[in-house]
Image: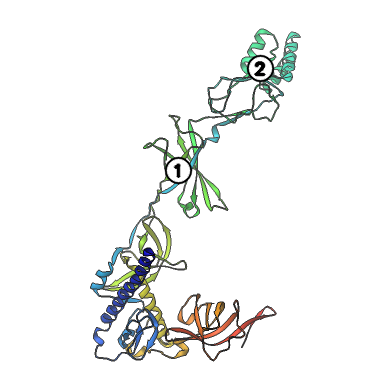
């Protein structure tokens, strides 16, 4: 109970503190903006946290905060999105800034991988004749062997017959038959040492010993003494460990940063403090459809033989790009999912939120492709509050300007104070027509939760929110899941639906019915 009480008290206190700071912030901004308009009468009063809540006289907002007066001079801004705050508020908010700089973005890629054999040096051992394994000199996988060391002894009737044919041709002193019989023995992989013994002793060898064709480590040992083998049977593999491969994966967004020949640093947990230097040996041409990652192959020398297949490794692929680009601190970027923004410093005590085209993002920096210029100042702390106020103020100006004023602004003409008209009609400001889907409806309170579409004239994106139906409207035909076309107004802080019609499907077309 004490913990719950503390959470409730903390939450309420935090909300009050946030509202107080925000009120101070907005009030200070208004004071700075209208310092020269104290003698003129306010146009109207607006809620500090809801610019759509307006009154013709002072009062309280739905949240209990004092309404803020808006003067005629407030419409004379050259840029609607500019926010003006006093130095004291800047200090209280802890606003920090940084310059947009042109520099090289060199962010290393950190990932993991597994040590594997260099497949170019991996040799598979197969017989070329049928027979039985009489003796196996290698007992288990993982044993080290040297080139020429015996691996297994094979009894093969086919090899015995080939030796007899050779000796018979030799006795008849038939040069052509002798050469043909010798070629057959070599084609059946008769070892050179066994060939020399056959020529010297002139005696058929019943069991032939086969030796290691290269030095390395035995892997995939698939035979035991007494096994019957035939061509196509994989007896074992011999992998050289002079150098190894490490196969790793990088995210799809990092694929463009990886190139063959880049330097790579590797560490392994079993040898703390030791690092290996290698390079990117190959970049695979396809991306994994499930993990959305790109495989890369790294190559490392293994002179000390410490690297062993299937070891887990941590690797860093070093970016050697020399291309300069616009960079800002990562924390300066506000990412909403549909838009990326930064808050620019446009003057002393003046800030504006602008949209940017975001490129590569690292742990500390963000690449800006479009939206800012070199040398401009961006806010890196308290930018969310400034962005919120700038966005609200910008939307407010779009609703306040008449179409003629907007057209003049787009042509680059300067707006004078008496050209800017505040339109307070319900049609353009306080009401809107929109379509939506009813998620839930409470017939007693006449409140419905509706996922509405975009409101183009206000510049509002689709949103799910609560609406109140006017008392004169009948709700008998409504139910959860209905798609409706409705008109709503903003009254006393509520979104009041004044008219609606059900949208139904007929022959694949949507029709509105009252």
Q: Can residue 501 be seen in this view?
A: yes
| Whether residue 257 is situated above or below residue 148 in the rendered picture | below
Label 1 to label 2: alpha-carbon separation: 46 Å
Q: For the residues carrying marks 1 and 2, which lies nearer the camera in this image?
A: 2
Quadrant of image for the N terminus: bottom left
| Residue at figure coordinates x 57%, y 77% from the top left | 437
List x then y, in percent, for residue 107: 39, 51
Quadrant of image for the C terminus: bottom right
Q: Is 218 on the left or on the right of 68, as rendered? A: right
| Residue at figure coordinates x 25%, y 75% from the top left | 86
Q: Do the residues labelled 1 and 2 touch (CB within 8 Å)?
A: no
- In the image, which disc is placed on residue 261? 1
List x then y, in percent, for residue 301: 45, 34
| Whether residue 382 is situated above or below residue 466 in the rendered picture | above
- Please tell me which residue lies in front, 274 or 120: 274
N-term mark: 1 or 2: 2
Instruction: Give the structural element (helix, strand or loop) at label 2.
Output: strand
- In the image, which disc is placed on residue 404? none
List x then y, in percent, for residue 157: 74, 18
Mark 2 is surrounded, within 10 Å at the Cα level, by few (under 14), some (14 to 19) or many (20 or more) other residues, namely: many
| Whether residue 44 is situated above or below residue 243 in the rendered picture | below
Mark 1 is surrounded, within 10 Å at the Cα level, by few (under 14), some (14 to 19) or many (20 or more) other residues, namely: few
Instruction: Give the structural element (helix, strand or loop) at label 1.
Output: loop
List x then y, in percent, for residue 274: 38, 36
Q: Is residue 327 visible?
A: no
- Please tell me which residue lies in front, 361 or 66: 66
Extreme residue in the front direction: 1
The quarter of the displayed image where residue 417 is located: bottom left
Q: Mark 2 points at which residue?
A: 208
Task: Please say which color scheme the image uses.
Answer: rainbow
């Amino acid at each position: 109970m004490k913990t719950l009480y503390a959470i409730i008290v903390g939450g309420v206190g935090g909300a009050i503190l946030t509202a107080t700071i925000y009120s101070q912030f907005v009030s200070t901004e208004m004071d700075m903006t209208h310092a020269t308009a104290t003698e003129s009468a306010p146009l109207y009063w607006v809620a500090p946290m809801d610019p759509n809540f307006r009154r013709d006289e002072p009062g309280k907002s739905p949240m209990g905060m004092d309404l803020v007066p808006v003067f005629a001079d407030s419409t004379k801004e050259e840029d609607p999105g500019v926010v003006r705050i006093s130095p004291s508020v800047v200090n209280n908010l802890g606003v920090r800034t940084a310059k947009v700089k042109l520099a090289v973005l060199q962010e290393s890629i950190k990932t993991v991988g597994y040590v594997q054999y260099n497949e170019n040096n991996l040799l598979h051992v197969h017989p070329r004749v049928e027979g039985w394994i009489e003796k196996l000199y290698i007992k288990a996988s993982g044993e080290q062997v040297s080139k020429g060391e015996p691996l297994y002894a094979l009894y093969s009737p086919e090899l015995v017959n080939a030796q007899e044919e050779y000796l018979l041709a030799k006795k008849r002193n038939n040069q052509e038959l002798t050469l043909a019989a010798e070629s057959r023995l070599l084609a059946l992989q008769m070892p050179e040492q066994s060939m020399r013994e056959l020529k010297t002793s002139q005696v058929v060898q019943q069991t032939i010993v086969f030796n290691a064709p290269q030095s390395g480590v035995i892997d995939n040992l698939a035979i035991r003494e007494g096994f019957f083998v035939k061509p196509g049977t994989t007896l074992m593999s011999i992998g050289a460990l002079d150098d190894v491969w490490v196969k790793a994966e990088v995210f799809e967004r990092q694929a463009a940063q990886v190139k063959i020949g880049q330097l790579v640093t590797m560490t392994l947990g079993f040898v703390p403090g030791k690092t290996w230097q290698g390079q990117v040996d190959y970049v695979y041409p396809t991306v994994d459809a499930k993990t959305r990652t790109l495989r890369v192959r790294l190559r490392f020398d293994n002179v000390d033989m410490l690297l062993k297949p299937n070891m887990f490794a941590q690797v860093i692929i070093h970016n050697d790009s020399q291309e300069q680009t616009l960079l800002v601190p990562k924390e300066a970027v506000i990412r909403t999912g549909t838009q990326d923004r930064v808050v620019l410093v446009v003057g002393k005590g003046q800030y504006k939120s602008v949209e940017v085209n975001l490129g590569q993002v690292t742990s500390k920096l963000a690449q800006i492709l479009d939206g800012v210029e070199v040398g401009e100042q961006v806010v890196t702390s308290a930018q969310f509050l400034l962005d919120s106020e700038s966005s609200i103020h910008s939307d407010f100006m779009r609703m306040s300007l008449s179409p003629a004023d907007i057209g003049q602004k787009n042509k680059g003409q300067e707006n004078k104070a008496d050209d800017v008209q505040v339109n307070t009609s319900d049609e353009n400001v306080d009401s809107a027509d929109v379509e939506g889907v009813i998620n839930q409806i409470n017939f007693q309170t006449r409140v419905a939760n509706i996922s509405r579409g975009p409101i183009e004239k206000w510049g509002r994106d689709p949103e799910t929110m609560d609406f109140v139906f006017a008392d004169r409207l009948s709700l008998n035909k409504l139910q959860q899941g209905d798609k409706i076309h409705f008109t709503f107004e903003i009254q006393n802080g509520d979104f009041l639906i004044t008219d609606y019609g059900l949208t139904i499907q007929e022959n694949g077309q949507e029709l509105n019915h009252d």
